[in-house]
Amino acid sequence: MTNFDVPKTPAEFVKSMLRDGIESDLLAVEHVNDRDLREPNIHAAVAAYVAANAMHNLRLNSPEAADILAERLAQVITAGDLAGPLYRAAKHLDLDPDQWITEFNERAARRGAKPEAGRRAAHIALTTLADRWKQMGGPAPDPDEGLFVDEPSPAEYARVERAATYREVAADLLETLRTGQIPHPLMTDAELEQHGTPEGAAS
C-alpha cells in the first residue's frame, strides 16, 4: 500500500488498487534503467489493474462476496501478513515461492552494493572536476600587487573575473565534498536557520 490507510470496502479497494497501480507504473518509469526494479513495478501495475477490475465486477455481480473479500483483505493488510497468503497461494498452485525469495535476496544484495560504489565514483569525479576548475582559475592574485600596470581592458577584466569564479566554484565544491554541507554563502535562509550562520558557527 502507498499509505497507512487500509481500505475497508470493495469501492475503497478498487480506488486504492487503481491509485497504487498508477504509482507502480510511475516507479517503473523512474527505474527504467534498472531491470530488477522496473519489471516488478510493471507487474505490480498490471496486477493492480487486474485486481481492480476483478473487485469492481465482483462488487457489481455479487456484493456480498465482495464485502467478505474486502473484509478479509483488510484483516490481512492490517496484520501485515500479505506475504503469507501470497506464499500459501503459490504453494497451492505447485509453484516455487522459495526460489523467488532466493532470487529476490540475490538481486537485493547486488543493488545494495551499487550505491556505495556509485557514491565513490561520483566523489572522485567531482573532486577531479573541482581540481580542473581550480587549475583553470590559476593562482589567486597577490593583493599587495596591482593586477595591471596600465589601465585594464574590458577583456582583461572579464578574464580576471572568470578566473576568480573558477577558483570560487572549485573551493565551494571541495568544501561541500569535505563537509557534506552546502557552503554558508550559498545556503538559503531556511538552510542558514537550520545549520547556523558563519558567525554563529565561529562563536
Image: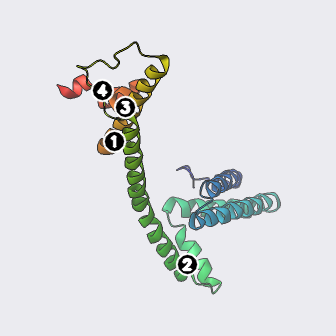
Which of pointers 4 and 3 indicates the residue nearer the eye?
4
Mark 1 and mark 4 in contact? Answer it, CB < 8 Å. no
x 42%, y 66%: residue: 113
Mark in front: 2 vs 1:
1
Can you identify the residue that label 2 sits on? 100
The residue that mark 3 highlights is 168
Reading the image, the residue beneath label 1 is 174
The three-letter code of the residue at mark 4 reads Pro
Three-letter amino acid code at the position of disc 2: Trp
Helix, strand or loop at mark 3: helix
CA separation in Å, label 1 and label 3: 10 Å
Mark 4 vs mark 3, CA separation in Å? 13 Å
Please tell me the numbered disc located at residue 141: 4
Furthest residue toward top: 151
Please rate how many residues cluster around mark 4, counting C-alpha atoms within 10 Å: few if below 14, some from 14 to 19, many from 20.
few
| Residue type at numbered disc 3 | Glu
Give residue 185's quadrant in the image: top left
Q: Is residue 187 visible?
A: no
Left or right for 8, reference 106: right
* Image location of residue 34, percent across then percent down: 58, 63
